[in-house]
Image: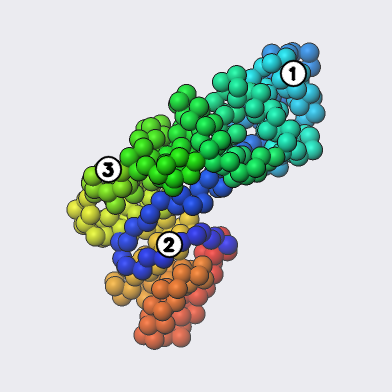
Amino acid sequence: MKTASSPTASVTGARLAPTATTLLLALGIHILGFTANATAAPGDVESTRNAAVQWKRSNKPNWVPIVVVDSARKSAEQGDAEAQNQIGSYYLTGSGVPKDGVEAIKWFLKSAVQGNAEAQFRLGVCYGIGASGASQDLVEAVKWFRKAAGQGHASAQYNLGLCYYKGDGVPKDDAEAVKWYRKSADQGNADAQYDLGVCYDSGTGVPKNAVEAVKWYRKSADQGYAAAQYNLGGCYGTGTGVPKDDAEAVKWYRKSADQGYASAQYHLGLYYAHGKDDVMAYVWLNNAATAGYLPAKHILIVISRRMTSVQITIAKRLSLEWQLK
C-alpha cells in the first residue's frame, strides 16, 4: 500500500513550507544506508580497496563479504581515508560486522580529520540526530556539515542550509539558508531545489518571485520529488508563475498522487469532481482519505451522494487496486 505524509492545506493549488523538522532524520537514514556492490580478487590490494569503497544506494540487505571488510580494515588502519569512511559505514549499518555506533563514529572521525567530505557529512548527520554513538550536538553537526559543504558536498550543503533555516546550531538566517540551498540545488539535489522553490514562493531569504519558484519546483519535480510535483501542480492550477493550465495541473498532481502524496490525491480528486467524473473523483478522494487526509473525507461524502451504488462499487474497487500496487 502506498502512503506518504501530507500537508494540511485544503485549498486547490496550496503549496508547502520546507519540511525542515524531519529532513535531518530522514536524510541520515537514507544517506547512510549503503551496501557493497563489488568484490576483489584475492591478493589484489588495490582492487580490494576499491571494492571496499565503491558503494551505491540500495534497498538490498546490508551484507558484505568478510574478505571485503578485512581488506578495508587493513587499508583503514594504514591511514586510507576512504577505507576509514567505509569501515565506519560497515559499523553504522552492521554490514559484515556487528552494528556499533561508537566504532562507526571513531572511523568516520579518523577519515573526516583527513578531509574526507563524505565522512565529514556523516559525522554531521550523526551529531545532528544524536545517533550512532554520538549525543545530539547541533553545533558539532554544523561544524562538520560546513567542512563537507566547503568541499562541494551537495547533501552537506543542503543540511547546512536547513540548520540556518531552523536556527539549529547557528543563529537562524534565512538568507544564509538560501545561499546553501542554492549551492546544493545547482548540483542537482532535489530536496534543495524544492526548498529553494519554497523560499522564492514565500519570499523567505529572497524577494518573492513566483517564476523562480516554478523554475526550482520543476527541477525537483523532474527528479520525481513528490512535494515539488504537488507544488508545481498548484502553480499551474492557480496560474502562479506560469500561465494557468488545468491540464498541466492535473498532470503534476497525478505524478505526485501516484507516489502516495495525499494532498495531491485530494486535489486531483477535486479536478475530477469538477469535471463530473465522479468515479475517478471518488477513487482519488478515497485514496487521500485512507491516508488520513481529513478534507478528502468531507468531500467524499458529498460526491457519494450523487453517485449510484454501482459507481461507488467500481470506484472502491479501483481505489483498492491502486492502494495494493
Where is residue 94 shown, x and y percent of the image?
A: 74, 39
Where is residue 116 shown, x and y percent of the image?
A: 57, 23
Identify the residue position indicated by label 2 in the image.
7
User: Relative to 273, does residue 108 appear above or below in the rendering?
Assistant: above
Q: Please rate how many residues cluster around mark 2, counting C-alpha atoms within 10 Å: few if below 14, some from 14 to 19, many from 20.
A: some
User: Relative to 243, does residue 175 appear above or below in the rendering?
Assistant: above
- Residue at image coords 60%, 34%: 123
Contact? badges 2 and 3 (CB < 8 Å): no
Identify the residue position indicated by label 3 in the image.
206
**Amino acid at pointer 3:** Val
The disc at residue 12 is none
**Residues at marks 1 and 3, CA–CA distance in whole angstroms:** 47 Å
Identify the residue position indicated by label 1 in the image.
77
Q: Please rate how many residues cluster around mark 3, counting C-alpha atoms within 10 Å: few if below 14, some from 14 to 19, many from 20.
A: some
Mark 1 falls on what kind of element?
A: helix
Q: Nearer the viewer, mark 1 or mark 2?
A: 1
- Residue at image coords 76%, 39%: 99
Mark 3 falls on what kind of element?
A: loop
- Residue at image coords 46%, 61%: 6
